Image: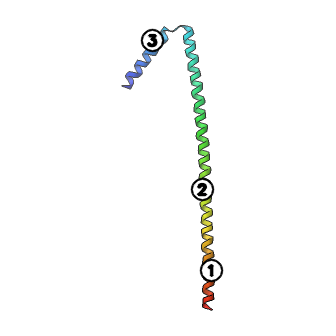
């Protein structure tokens, strides 16, 4: 079905272009060139947006990893301090 629709569109375009004058053909070419430039500019903008988003995501992941590492260090320090307190209390109780 796609092939039939595509063939019909191509045939219609070919007949339309055959009936056009030189001026109309030039305008069509200018329009196609402008559309291509717009498409290229939009693709560039989309690529920049993806790159910016990817960079921001990477920064967010790195920040989250840093926070998790800091929390792990604090937790380890808290455990060590608590163990030291328990050891001191045990020594006092043993005396």
In the rendered image, residue 95, in percent from the top left (x then y), is placed at 63, 92
The residue beneath circle 3 is 15
In the rendered image, residue 32, in percent from the top left (x then y), is placed at 55, 20
- Image vertical order of residue 87 relative to residue 68, above or below: below
Q: CA distance from mark 1 to mark 3?
A: 92 Å
The residue beneath circle 1 is 85
- Label 3 vs label 2, nearer the camera: 2
Q: CA distance from mark 3 to mark 2?
A: 61 Å
User: Which of disc 2 and disc 3 is earlier in sequence?
Assistant: 3
The residue beneath circle 2 is 64
The colour mode here is rainbow
Badge 3: residue crowd in 10 Å (few <14, some 14–19, many ≥20)? few
* Residue 26, label in figure: none
Which type of secondary structure does the marked residue at label 3 adopt? Answer: helix
In the rendered image, residue 25, in percent from the top left (x then y), is placed at 54, 12
Q: Are marks 1 and 3 in contact (CB under 8 Å)?
A: no
Which type of secondary structure does the marked residue at label 2 adopt? Answer: helix
């Amino acid at each position: 079905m796609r092939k039939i629709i595509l063939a019909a569109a191509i045939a219609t375009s070919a007949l339309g272009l055959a009936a056009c004058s030189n001026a109309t053909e030039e305008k069509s070419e200018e329009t196609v060139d402008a559309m291509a430039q717009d498409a290229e500019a939009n693709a560039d903008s989309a690529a920049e947006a993806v790159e910016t988003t990817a960079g921001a995501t990477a920064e967010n992941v790195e920040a989250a990893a840093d926070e998790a590492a800091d929390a792990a260090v604090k937790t380890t320090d808290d455990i060590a301090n608590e163990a030291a307190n328990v050891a001191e209390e045990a020594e006092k109780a043993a005396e």
